Image (cartoon, coloured by chain):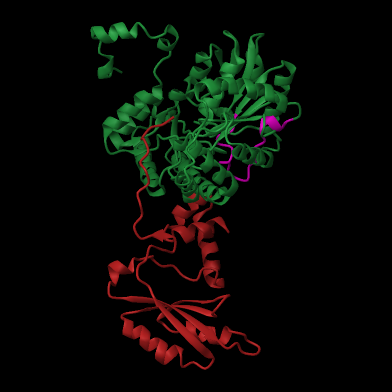
Chain colours: A green, B red
Amino acid sequence: MKSPSDSPDNLSLSVKSKISDRIQAIPRSGIREFFELVLNAGDVISLGVGEPDFSTPWHIREAAIYSLEKGQTSYTSNLGLLELRKSITKYVAKKFHVDYDPAKEVIVTVGVSEALDLAFRALLNPGEEVIYHEPCYVSYSPTIYMAYGVPVVVETKAEDDFALRAADVERCITPKTKVIMLNFPTNPTGAVMDPKELQGIADLAIKHDLIVITDEIYSELLYDDRTHPSIAALPGMKERTILMHGFSKAFAMTGFRLGYACAPPELTEAMMKIHQYSMLCAGITAQVAAIEALEHGAAPMEEMRKAYWRRRNLVVSKLNGAGLKTFQPGGAFYAFPDIRSTGMTSREFATRLLEEEKVAVVPGTAFGKAGEGFVRACYATDEKQLAIALDRIADFAQRHRK
Amino acid sequence: MDALLDLLTKDSRLSPEDLAARLNLTPAEVKSKTAAWEADGTILGYQAVVDPEKTDPGGVTALIEVRLTPERGGGFDRLAERVAKFDQVTTCWLMSGGYDLAVVVQAGSLQEVARFVAEKLSTLGGVLSTVTHFQLKIYKQNGFLSTPTPDGSRLPITP
């Protein structure tokens, strides 16, 4: 798709030639393209977002406001406020059963996105490979690539409810493999990991001496009394794992841009080197808010989790009822319906649903080739709007049933 | 709290089918559980939360602090239950601290409240004293803000 800024006048042509080959080679994110379609479509119910519909709980916002009133507006330590790192290690120990030293095994970052960038840049020599699973969050592959690594895809499958199999990972391991990247519960599928397969992946990491990066951003949003062990907690794994987590999803703090990585001291130090020369530190207001979230945010978080759970049930039952086969996702706030019964591609489905019913979902292909035949419907949306959107999707699916 | 009960406290107008779809239950299960709670008094009632400034701008709401003499055997119960029976009383709590009952009264005018306090409440045997406070403005009731502030708008598509 062309936007006006792409028009080939002489000036932009000459500037374009100055952009590094590497960055030019990165394709535009499929999600951005779709974003523009949605903006132009006007009054749309959007199930296309990747963030909570709740605003940050008031007690957290209020803590941020209070910190500003007190004049807490300075830089912090490169690693982040020590008080926050202490809260993080306490929280991580309780939630994931792994103990980290707040002095040298935690770095506070501008979202998990920055933590990922730091980790890949700290770990990868040019040409070294990172195995990750698709469909997945849109930035994994470009972030690996920008760190001069080679992204190696393992596709997860609908018949496994998009969980990862250790055997599929093993087939991708080469002498150049350095990192296995995990994200469960997964954006965009809501998939969760079977503990046995997780152990299988840990065994592979140990056998082949690999680093594991685990993006735990959705790990609070689990349903049906499911527990979610982090791979970092498995025997022999802490010393080779970078556990990444943040505040965006569970505490509804996306705009605060705050995350963290817990890793062995040498790795934390290497990530800190990059962080100190690029970001310096995460914003102090967000860090203060994060302390409040960790220390006092459990009850509001649980309320939000229960709301997501109810909506998940509603979405999955309605979509299945409409003939769009949808597995019951164990976590996150996405449903990933199979739309092949309409005979359309993901993109066609999403585009026509937008045009005909004014409902936005994201084509599964925005999250990797393995997402073909599926769309992502985010149920972190006001319940009344969600119910209307589901009725419209049902009408659409009936009408286009092949 | 039971998930069905929890959802009913948030929105009691959802149909049994709507409730069932959100909670992975069948409509029949929803109906039988609800009926059981209604029968055993777990669910006391259902009501709309209205803004009295819109429906009854002249109306008056007062919070009355009441001090009582406890009775041998029943403590405050007999008197408190008697106070609670008045139609004007919408809420009646036994409190710790400087007084015993917190009584919320709704009436059409100041005079009505005054009459209630003077004729009904103060004259009850066992009532030692009352202090009446009038409500000036409602900012929040039953969890609902009077003027909800719209939350910041999200972008329609994000990764």
Horizontally, is A108 left or right of A17 in the view?
Answer: right
Classify residue A233 by image quadrant: top right
Nearest the eye: A305 or A236:
A236
Horizontally, is A92 left or right of B89 in the view?
Answer: right
User: Is residue A64 inside the magenta stretch?
Assistant: no
Magenta segment, which residues? A215-234
Residue A367, given in percent of the width and then of the height, sits at 47, 24
Nearest the eye: A255 or B26:
A255
Task: State the quadrant of the C terminus of chain A.
Answer: top left
Please say if A96 is above or below B139: above
User: Is residue A216 inside the magenta stretch?
Assistant: yes
Nearest the eye: A219 or A384:
A219
Instruction: Find the residue positioned furthest to the right.
Output: A235
Residue A5, given in percent of the width and then of the height, sits at 27, 17
What residue is rendered at 66% in x and 23% in y?
A: A166
Nearest the eye: B102 or A28:
B102
Residue A345 visible, this orientation = no
Give the number of callouts. Answer: 0
Classify residue A345 by image quadrant: top left
Residue A385 visible, this orientation = yes
Residue A102, given in percent of the width and then of the height, sits at 66, 34
Task: State the quadrant of the N terminus of chain A.
Answer: top left
Residue A209, given in percent of the width and then of the height, sits at 72, 16
Name the chief secondary structure element in magenta: loop
What residue is rendered at 34% in x and 76% in y?
A: B60
